[in-house]
Amino acid sequence: MKNLTLTNTVQTQEDKDKQCELQKSGEIPEHIAIIMDGNGRWARSKGSIRLHGHKVGVDSVRDITESCAQLGVKYLTLYAFSTENWGRPSAEVRGLMRLLVSSLRKEAENLHENNIRLVTIGQLDRFPEDCRKELQEAIELTQNNDRLQLCLALSYSGRWDITEAVKKIATHVKEGRLDPSLINDQMITDHLSTAEIPDPDLIIRTSGEYRISNFLLWQLAYSELYMTEQFWPDFRREELYKAIRSFQSRDRRFGKLSTTKDENGLATRLVDKLK
């Protein structure tokens, strides 16, 4: 779990120029999803306890959320707590729950003032009542905001998401409301917890790990992946800009042929030779 803070910090002219350059140089991802990893290892490297790393992660959440809103990113999904995280030591889990409650209580108004909508995906029924209460209040307060949608994946796993979608579809079939032959990719997408959110354009993972860790397994089919050695507490907007520059340099074909001029020209020449 990462503490959630958003404040109206003063943006420097240098940073505005960098963002303007990014916006002009290529496409800004509509949806960025981040596996925020490395809080515990960052804390150990500082000779501190794991929970300290989660607390310091607040600065990265704030900075990345702010910079995404400034750049025009419309959806930001943060993998905050996986279903597997329930297996961590009970003291750490309790500390994370306290962080979630205090953070939401403190920052809901800041999110609202910044025109940011908060939503969640995951098994929220597994959280303590006070956590669910603070989440619901923040969600209701920000529900009409449209600058950026901040989605917290809480007690979430990609396998759980797909399983729940299959259960819903199976129920429709059992009740005679759906012909199984009509089940397709779009139908499954429409029954996922992210049905109202476009698939991520860019997935970022911090801490040098090269795993998806059960995150948005269906949704990331054609997402661009960006892995960085930076631990989450050290991941700030400069690192985000690097990820976006990498995204802009890639040729996203979605399984089709490239649309670049060079490859189109080559294809035309090959066709001419075959005539």
Image: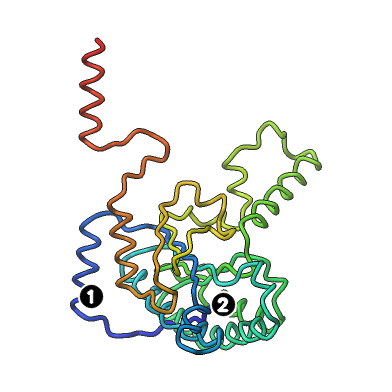
Name the quarter where the C terminus is drawn: top left
**Disc 1 marks which residue?**
15
Closest to the observer: 77 or 186? 77
- Residue at 23% from the left image edge and 23% from the top image edge: 268
Question: Circle 2: is it few (<14), some (14-19), or many (20+) Cα within 10 Å?
Answer: many
**Disc 2 marks which residue?**
1
Q: Position of residue 136 (x, y in %)?
A: 62, 76
Q: Position of residue 194 (x, y in %)?
A: 56, 57
Specify the amino acid type for callout 1.
Asp
Question: Relative to residue 61, is residue 121 drawn left or right?
Answer: right
Q: Which mark is residue 255?
A: none
Q: Secondary structure at mark 1?
A: helix
- Residue at 20% from the left image edge and 28% from the top image edge: 265
Question: Relative to residue 149, is residue 21 drawn left or right?
Answer: left
Question: Relative to residue 98, is residue 68 drawn left or right?
Answer: left
Q: Secondary structure at mark 2?
A: loop
- Residue at 32% from the left image edge and 58% from the top image edge: 28
Vertical comparison of 13 with 270: above or below = below
The nearer-to-camera label among 2 and 1 is: 2
Question: Circle 1: is it few (<14), some (14-19), or many (20+) Cα within 10 Å?
Answer: few
Quadrant of the rendered structure where residue 65 is?
bottom left
Q: Position of residue 197 (x, y in %)?
A: 51, 57
Q: Position of residue 109 (x, y in %)?
A: 48, 84
Cα–Cα gap, marks 2 and 1: 28 Å
Quadrant of the rendered structure where residue 105 is?
bottom right
Vertical comparison of 12 with 178: above or below = below
